[in-house]
């Protein structure tokens, strides 16, 4: 920010001049560095005040701090986008410090408001982004309840922990997709009486194996890496599922 302050001498410690229109000097101070430029005021003449205003505008000041100034000069400055503050006292450095201190609460309020608006905007964007997923989850629950009967599940999941875990890993590997959907299917399977180990294996392989995307993985990362990664994830799903079911059984 560039602040113009009329002064009695070309120094930051010089007193603020009584009037902008008749000041000996105008100091244009950069508030970031406190470096300043000195503009000598006109010695005499009827247009002294106008000359100072023109000099301030040429130096692209943002604010004028003055002890006093005429309404005509203040209006001209404001019409050109310059903030005008009268009744400045003390020396130039003190006047600038007082002005900046008075601005801090206002700037803090603006910053907090901006942060609130930004947070609301981000939240709305995230809500819009997940609406398709939420709609897909609702649709998936309905389709699962209609198309998959308990009788069908009973023929696939017999209640044997090892075979149910293996079946769950196989289904999860083939039916890979959105992780949220795996939780929906897992909940429906638990409600239908499928064991926790089988459901855990399905969820694990659903998000980590993905045979559907294997061709793209081979093309992108290489056949050896893709096959080893997929086989390792499938093999690990069995002990992970069994271990998770065992631990849950201990604490429940």
Image (spheres, rainbow, N blue to C red):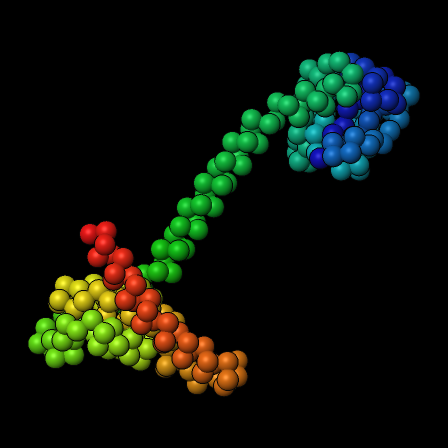
Task: Report whether 212 appears left or right of 113.
Answer: left
Whether residue 5 is visible, yes or no, is yes
213 or 7, nearer to the observer: 213
Whether residue 137 is visible, yes or no, is no
212 or 37, nearer to the observer: 212
Give the quarter of the image for residue 238. Answer: bottom left
Which residue does the image show at 66% across and 35% down from the upper left? 81
Which residue does the image show at 70% across and 22% down from the upper left? 97
Q: Position of residue 118 (x, y in %)?
A: 47, 46
Tally of marks: 0
Give the quarter of the image for residue 250. Answer: bottom left
Q: Position of residue 136 (x, y in %)?
A: 27, 67
Q: Position of residue 249 (x, y in %)?
A: 21, 57
Which residue does the image show at 50% across and 86% down from the upper left? 223
Task: Report whether 101 appears left or right of 185.
Answer: right
155 over 179 or under it: above or below: below
Residue at the left extreme, as displayed: 151
Q: Position of residue 77 (x, y in %)?
A: 70, 30
12 or 130, nearer to the observer: 130
Q: Could you tell me which quadrant the N terminus lies in?
A: top right
Which residue does the image show at 82% across and 27% down from the upper left? 27
């Amino acid at each position: 920010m560039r602040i113009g302050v009329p002064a009695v001498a070309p120094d930051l410690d010089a007193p603020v001049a009584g009037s902008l229109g008749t000041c000996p000097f105008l100091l244009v101070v950069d508030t970031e560095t406190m470096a300043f430029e000195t503009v000598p005021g006109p010695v005499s003449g009827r247009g002294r005040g106008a000359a100072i205003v023109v000099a301030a505008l040429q130096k692209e000041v943002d604010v004028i701090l003055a002890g006093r100034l005429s309404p005509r000069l203040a209006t001209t400055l404001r019409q050109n986008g310059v903030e005008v503050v009268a009744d400045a006292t003390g020396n130039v450095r003190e006047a600038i410090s007082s002005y900046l201190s008075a601005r801090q609460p206002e700037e803090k309020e603006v910053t907090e408001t901006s942060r609130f608006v930004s947070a609301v905007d981000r939240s709305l964007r995230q809500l819009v982004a997940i609406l398709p997923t939420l709609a897909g989850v609702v649709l998936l629950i309905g389709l699962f309840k209609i198309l998959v009967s308990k009788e069908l599940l009973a023929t696939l999941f017999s209640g044997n922990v090892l075979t149910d875990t293996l079946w769950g890993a196989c289904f999860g590997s083939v039916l890979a997709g959105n992780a949220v959907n795996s939780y929906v299917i897992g909940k429906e399977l638990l409600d239908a009486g499928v064991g926790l180990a089988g459901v855990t294996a399905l969820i694990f392989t659903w998000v980590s194996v993905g045979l559907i995307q294997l061709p793209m993985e081979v093309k992108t990362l290489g056949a050896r890496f893709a096959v080893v990664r997929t086989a390792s994830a499938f093999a690990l799903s069995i002990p992970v599922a069994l271990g998770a079911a065992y631990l849950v059984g201990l604490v429940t």
